[in-house]
Each structure stands twice: as structure tokens, then as C-alpha cells.
Amino acid sequence: MNTSIKARLGIMMFLQFFVWGAWFVTLGTYLGSIDFSGSQVGYTYLMNNIAAIISPFFIGMVADRFFHSQKVMGVLHILGAMVLFYASSITVAGPLILFLLIYNICYMPTLALVNTIAFNQMENPEKQFPAIRVWGTIGWIVAGLSISFFLAPVYANVEATNIPIKMAAIASALLGVYSFTLPGTPPKNVGKDITVGDILGLKAIRLMKDRSFLVFVLASLLISIPLAFYYSFTNMFLNDIGMINVAGKQSMGQMSEVIFMVLIPWFFVRLGVKKMLLLGMASWVLRYALFSLGDVGGTVWMLYLGILLHGICYDFFFVSGQIYVDKKADESIRASAQGFITLVTYGIGIGIGSIVSGNVVDMYTVDGIKDWDTIWWIPAGFSLLVMAFFALTFKDTMRSTS
């Protein structure tokens, strides 16, 4: 893969995750400013999870069988840009949630398409892909910094406005146009029969005959529920208690993600999968406890530490989990197994969490004032229970080969 191709794919990844980071982080704060209840915020974020469940059907049944990936991505991003820009002007809950569902149905399939386009250009994906994918994380970071340090000086209280959503729509339109210039990536399953089971990764269900894999799947589902609290309400919480330039500061979580991603192989060899996964879960417990105890005064360091824990929270559980699945599944069902665990976590688990988190926030809101201390202890306690369940029931059968 030559330098020109690397640069073009890097730009693609940068824009792909810039778009997502531009609207997703501050959405909860904006929705609160237009009088959405906690449950309405949760249901709005749920649209992302529903789209994550739907998108594999689109990829498997349509994109992988009939069209070049770069063209499909271009159309989806341009269509998504129009939908998102229009949605930014809607302030009524029902219509806004509906249009964000339509937008997410456009966006979520492109996550798989950018990987397909990148892999198609690589001779050695294991070595070459990380250097391309890291530009996606950089794009997410730059989106947060742009909101805090470029938009905030121009627009007062920008995170509570629709400006970040409009910025995401503009970036999506740019990526849509740019997509048509990317290397040709023809459909890979022309003429093949694809079943629903293939798309959802249901072949991997047989792996759950192994007790430890079953425990891993259940723990992955359950730990994804408190994860939704972070995605849906952290920005609202930090703005609510008086922190400034929150979007930029939240990007520190992605910075730590890059660092720990590099360190995962070192930790994996020395700790094994069980301890890695337990450290990831323990970090969720600690993060939410820090959010409950911290404030913007003398304990502001707790809030920053809670943000920086994102690298361990995400990498040690989700990335280590993907490695575990890769080792556990034989080659014939490896892709199916990865698809299945993605469905369980990002589709079902975080989807349930989006609903639960919104209702918890409503439960502890009185006269518009949110009891954030209590709110954060709930996902902390739930994460601790999941951690205890996993510690007592999971047997690390991979330890000797890690």
C-alpha cells in the first residue's frame, strides 16, 4: 500500500469519526436545553443502537452484493447530511427522534464500509489497519476540540445549541463527496446467498455451549448497560455542574484510548483475558464513583480522572473481548462470532442502557434539578455486580496461550 493510498484512507477515517464525534457527544446537553426529559434523551440515543442492529442487514443484503462500497458510502453520507441538517432545526421530541433514527440508519452502515474500503487496499491488514484506524480516533478528538476551542468563542454556550449538529452535517456532506474519489471497492458477495443468521452472526451461538464463553457473552451484555450512562449523559452532567469546554475535555478519553490500545498486547501477555476484562469492568465502577464524588472545585481531578479512564474502560473490556472472541472461535465462524458480540453489546446492551439511563435520570430529577451524585452511583453499583458475577463464574481457559 503506497503513501498516497494511506493518506487517502487516513482522511476517510478522520472524517468518518469526526462526523460521529461532532454530534454524538454534545447531543444530550442540547436536548436538555430544548426541554427533553431524561427518558426522551435516552430514547434519542437509542436510535443509534437500533440503527446498529439494522445496519448489518443493509450491508449484508445490499452493499456487499450489488454496489461498490465507496459509492454506497458517498450516497449514505450525502443523504445523512441532509437529514441531519434538517433534524437540527426540529425541537419537538417525536419528529426529532424519528429523523435521528433515519440519520443513524444512514450513518451506521458506513462504519463497516470504511473498514471494507480500507481492508481492500491492504496486503497485511493486521499490521497496516491500526495505523489507518487511529486517524478515526484522532478525528473524534479533533471534533471535540473544535467545539470547545473554535465554536465556543463564537457561539455562547455552544454545547447547548444545534451548532455541533450542523457542523457534523457539513462534515458528512464533505465525506460523502470525498467518498466518490476513494479506491474502487467492488461488492464481495455477488451472487452469494446470505441468510439472516449469517448477518447476525448466529452461527456463533454454538460457542455458548462453552460455559466460559456463555459467561463472557452475558457479562458483555450486562456491562454494556451502564456504558450507556456515559455516552448519553456525561456531557450534560459536566455542563450542568459548571465545567467549561466540556467537549474538548471529554476528548481526553479518546486520547487515553489511543495510548492503552498500543499497550494492550503487553498487558494481554502478562495478565491474560480474565484479568484484562476485570480491569475494564473495575474501571467502569471507579469512573462512575469519581463522577459522583467529584465537582468543579477542589475535587475536579476526580472528573478528569473519570474521563481519562475511558482508555481502560473501553480497550481493556471491548478490545480485549474482541481478541478473546478471535481466539475462541475457529476460522470458519470467526467473523460470525465478532458480528454476534457486536450485536450483543452495541445493539442490545447499550440499547437497553439508553432506555434505563434516561429513566434513572428522570427518577432523580426534581423541579429540573438532577441529583447527579445518586444517578452515577447506580451504574457504578450495577457495574460492580457484573464484575463480581464475571469474577466468580468465568474461567480463563485462554491464559496459557495469551
Image (tube, helix red, strand yellow):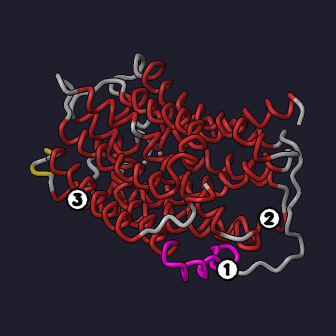
Q: Is residue 169 visible?
A: no
Say what amino acid the circle numbered 1 marks.
Answer: Val
Q: How far across and down, in percent of the image, does residue 145 sit?
A: 48, 25
Which of the marked residues, 3 or 2, is nearer the chain's N terminus? 2
Question: Residue at the location (56% across, 37% down)?
Answer: 263
Q: Nearer the viewer, residue 348 or 186?
A: 348
Query: Magenta-highlighted stretch: main secondary structure?
Result: helix
Q: Is residue 145 magenta?
A: no
Q: Nearer the viewer, residue 230 or 167?
A: 230
Per the image, label 3 sits on a secondary structure element best described as helix
Q: How far across and down, in percent of the image, does residue 200 sit?
A: 63, 74
Q: Which residue is mark 3?
A: 360
Say what amino acid the circle numbered 3 marks.
Answer: Val
Q: Quadrant of residue 266?
A: top right
Q: How far across and down, in percent of the image, does residue 163 sit?
A: 45, 33
Q: Nearer the viewer, residue 47 or 173?
A: 47
Q: Which residue is mark 1?
A: 196
Q: How far across and down, in percent of the image, does residue 365 sit?
A: 15, 51
Disc 3 versus disc 2: distance between alpha carbons? Answer: 40 Å
Disc 1 versus disc 3: distance between alpha carbons? Answer: 34 Å
Question: Residue at the location (71% across, 71% down)?
Answer: 330
Disc 2 versus disc 1: distance between alpha carbons? Answer: 14 Å
Per the image, label 2 sits on a secondary structure element best described as helix
* 191 sits to left or right of 116: right
Q: Quadrant of residue 157?
A: top left
Please state the extent of the stretch shown in magenta in the rendering: 198-212
Q: In what quadrant of the picture does the N terminus appear? A: top right
Q: Nearer the viewer, residue 392 or 196?
A: 392
Which of the marked residues, 1 or 3, is nearer the chain's N terminus? 1
Q: Which residue is mark 2?
A: 64
* 104 sits to left or right of 125: left
Say what amino acid the circle numbered 2 marks.
Answer: Asp
